[in-house]
Amino acid sequence: MSASAEATVLITHAVGLHARPSVKFTKLAKTFAAEVEVAVAANGPWFDAKSIVKVMAAKAPKGTLLHIRAKGDGATQAVKALVDLVQRDFDEDADHARTA
Amino acid sequence: MSVGNRVMRIEGIPASPGYAEGPLFDLDQPPVSYKAKASAEEEQTALVSAIGKAVGRLAVLVETADGDAAGILEFHIAMLEDDALSGPALTAIGSGQPADAAWRAALDREIAGYEASDQDYFRARAADLRDIRDQVLRALSEDGEAAAPPGAILHGEDIAPTRFLETDWSKGGGIALQRGSTASHVAMLARSRGVPMVVGLGALAAPRTGDALLNAEHGAIIFSPSLAETEAFRQSASAFADRLGAAKTFLTEPAVTKAGTAVRVQVNIAYPSDVEGIDIESCDGVGLMRTEFLFGKTLPDEETQYHAYRKVLEWAGGKPVTIRTVDAGGDKPVPGFTVEEINPFLGLRGIRLSLKRLDIFRVQIRALLRAAIHGNLRVMFPMIATPDEYSQAAALFAEERAALVARGVAHRLPPLGIMVEVPSVALAPEDFADVAFFSIGSNDLTQYVMAAARDNAAVAHLNSVRQPAVLRLIAAVAAFGLEKGIPVSLCGDAGGDPETIPALLEAGLRDLSVAPAQLAMAKAAIAGVAV
């Protein structure tokens, strides 16, 4: 049952994968059983996508091509969901609209 | 003089009016130091439970925080809950280190990593990591540390904003500080929540325990009061409450002097969430919305700012909302933005800093232009000293506006005005005849005219708007505005001070902006003036 998936996505959020976006990114990653990793270069280093400490350590600013890979149950769905989140600019807009 | 149980009265400076009677709570108790445990397992358990305690505290704060502050707190929680943060410390404990040293070393390594980043946003995170580190160190060492009992008078050298926010003020209580400042962040919070506060009590050896009476209307604290003193205090407190109650009847009415002169009274706010407790019907708009607190620990992005401004504009309906561009620097440092200076009040602050950091300023300008379509926005620049600074800032608005036009983004160019707080503007207002409005920042104007730092209790007697030289400048600006048809308002603390209001109206002002908690008293004071 071991699946694997990989994708790249451009970070368009104004300040990149920093505090608030990282919270959302890791929370979403944790909803999947698969092992998920991110990197800012194709050849790594790879960071655990479920650890905010590690994701923050990747220091990915706006304009970074983020590499995401997953292994295990739901790997394809995990990569797709995370790519979507980055493409939606981490839903920052919608969240603020709710509290505004 | 013995401090034993003798009655002792110390004078200070009122920072937030009111009366409090209750037990003293010592803010300066030496931090309980961490007690080493018997085994590595116990050390590890102590660290894990301290992290849990810190998370629990943050979770409580999240519930009352608004969107932006909550976002930062949630980030702290997520970091603390990540095993990757505690892992290295737990390993170090396993090889013989005590929990506090292991945690400090592990976090200091993380902090160094952020400080080494070449990007402002990530460098600014070092401050968050330090905060996270210290929260856990505090939880580790305070096994038995007491929280302030409800209704206590918090007494000490100074107070941290988090301590203020963690304290339950629903049962009364107050704050008495040896140092402190009426312009501090906590003083502002105290005024807007109606918590009595006195600063500048000085370093006299005062009792640390027992009961005390805090008179934050006139600025004094009485330790170990006699029965007679307690009775007199209660009478003053109840007279104050009566006046406050009587003033409430003025709250919903437009402000008018005894002679029938109408005075506009607006409010000053610091956070978008401040408006939640204010009835828009009770004021004429927002005379000053500070934006530096949005910049508190992180640099907010355009969307965050846009939604913060929009929220206040929508709350105000059609009433004017004057937003001041970021006034960082001075006593309001922002990590990743302000620079460290020997004399920050005379350095790179306000518009000077914004014009140096165009990357950050342009983000704010775009957010303001976009938000302007949601209400009656006016924008003002802080710390303007020369006409050229205003022209540069106005030109940036024009440039960003052109870019929004090109992108087809909805926006509106708001009227652009300036703060009058550097004496060069007050002395030569004719050089600024093309601004849309003047807003007198009386706190800074006074400190610059009198050469008396507003955060220094030792020169507080000089720091008064009622000094003739300061009043003369205010009158000159008001007269110039009247002559040229340029609106002039005042948004410093003096505008909400019942004892100063008569002098301000006599100087020709008809437009004041005050802390929300002072609205009723200010209107009541206006009603008693014969101008």
Image (cartoon, rainbow, N blue to C red):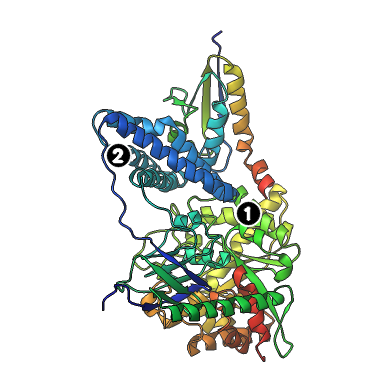
Q: Amino acid at mark 2?
A: Ala
- At horizontal 65% and vertical 42% (from top left) the residue drawn is A95
The relative height of residue B19 versus residue A5 in the rendered view (above or below) is below
Q: Position of residue B317 (x, y in %)?
A: 75, 62
Specify whether disc 2 shares its chain with disc 1: yes
Task: Tell me which chain the residue with mark 1 is part of.
Answer: B
Q: Please indicate whether residue A84 sits to the left or right of residue B469 in the image.
A: right
Q: How many marks?
A: 2
Task: Tell me which chain the residue with mark 2 is part of.
Answer: B
- At horizontal 55% and vertical 46% (from top left) the residue drawn is B62
- At horizontal 28% and vertical 40% (from top left) the residue drawn is B101
Q: Position of residue B372 (x, y in %)?
A: 70, 59
Q: Mark 2 vs mark 1: which is more N-terminal?
A: 2
Q: Amino acid at mark 1?
A: Ala
Which residue lies under the disc numbered 2? B105
Q: Secondary structure at mark 1?
A: helix
- At horizontal 56% and vertical 79% (from top left) the residue drawn is B497
Q: Secondary structure at mark 2?
A: helix
| Residue B218 visible in rendering | yes
Q: Nearer the viewer, mark 2 or mark 1?
A: 2
Which residue lies under the disc numbered 1? B308
Q: Please indicate whether residue B390 sits to the left or right of residue B452 in the image.
A: right
Q: Please indicate whether residue B273 sits to the left or right of residue B233 in the image.
A: right
The mark found on residue A31 in the picture is: none
| CB under 8 Å between discs 2 and 1 | no
